[in-house]
């Protein structure tokens, strides 16, 4: 089975009603990124950061996978599919995709404040202040913040290096190190880019599909399933 690697970003989740990570004004849900998505913010005001992610988690749990998420599941009938996502929601899994790598964590789990490898499922949408891990530290969202290491980046780079087809969906390639993953894809591999605003310049082997995810992904999946 041919290996298809798909890198997804905020654009695919936006069509399920989830706000993109960074809007045109530089804010996320009305907050400065520095106030809710850094270790310094957590040290300064953990209650506010906790509440921010509780609200984001509630939104995720209320959202549903869209046509793009569902179309990607169909590829597993014919191909060996790995989805690498920059998103912290679980919509790929809920759609039915079975091999998903979360670069920036997943908001439906909590983690220890002192050991990011120590994670737990969350019952419902809320992590309360005072809930602690087995090491005695406050639980927080299992999300990689700015200034923190991206533990899955090396795994993701190897997956991209082994790709036989590469698909980029709904990402502006603005957040590093995730944005650099496309550079690990072998040059002779066909790369499809699905986004209303194509984030990289034209080059040989790149097929540009300037559509939103719910249009472009089902269209490409139909092509690949017939090919």
Image (cartoon, grey):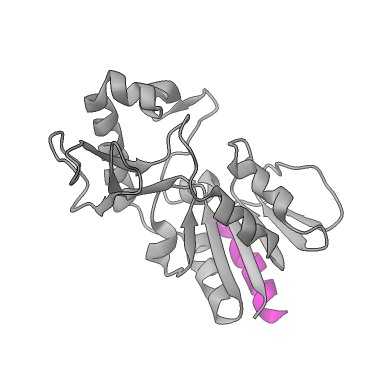
Residue 221 highlighted magenta (yes or no): yes
- The residue most toward the front is 135
Query: Can see residue 216?
Result: no
Q: Residue 204: horizontal and vertical position, in percent?
A: 87, 55
The quadrant of the rendering that contains the C terminus is bottom right
Relative to 174, is 93 above or below?
A: below
- The residue most toward the right is 204
Query: Can see residue 6?
Result: yes
What residue do we see at 41% from left, 57% from top? 91
Q: Residue 65: horizontal and vertical position, in percent?
A: 41, 59
Q: How many labels does the image show?
A: 0
What residue do we see at 48% from left, 46% from top? 151
- The residue most toward the top is 44
Range of residues picked out in magenta: 214-227
| Nearer to the camera, 220 or 181 | 181
In the rendered view, does 123 fall on the left or right side of 88?
A: left
Relative to 10, is 49 above or below?
A: above
Q: Residue 180: horizontal and vertical position, in percent?
A: 67, 43
What residue do we see at 65% from left, 58% from top? 160
What residue do we see at 29% from left, 28% from top? 49
């Amino acid at each position: 089975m041919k290996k298809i690697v798909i890198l997804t970003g905020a654009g695919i989740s936006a069509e399920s009603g989830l706000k993109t990570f960074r809007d045109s004004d530089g804010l996320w849900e009305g907050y400065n990124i520095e106030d809710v998505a850094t270790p310094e913010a957590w040290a300064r005001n953990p209650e506010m950061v906790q509440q921010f992610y509780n609200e984001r988690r509630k939104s995720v749990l209320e959202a549903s996978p869209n046509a793009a998420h569902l179309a990607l599941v169909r590829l597993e009938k014919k191909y060996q599919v790995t989805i690498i996502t920059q998103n912290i929601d679980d919509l790929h899994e809920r759609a039915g995709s079975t091999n998903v790598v979360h670069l920036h964590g997943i908001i439906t789990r909590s983690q220890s404040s002192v050991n990011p490898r120590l994670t737990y499922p969350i019952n419902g949408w809320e992590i309360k202040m005072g809930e602690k891990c087995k090491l005695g530290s406050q639980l927080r969202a299992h999300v990689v913040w700015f200034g923190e290491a991206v533990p899955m980046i090396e795994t993701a780079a190897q997956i991209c290096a082994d790709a036989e087809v590469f698909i980029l969906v709904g990402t502006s390639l603005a957040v590093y190190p995730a944005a650099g993953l496309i550079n690990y894809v072998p040059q002779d591999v066909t790369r499809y880019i699905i986004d209303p605003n194509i984030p990289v310049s034209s080059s040989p082997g790149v097929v540009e599909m300037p559509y939103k995810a719910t249009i472009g992904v089902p269209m490409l999946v139909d092509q690949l399933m017939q090919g």
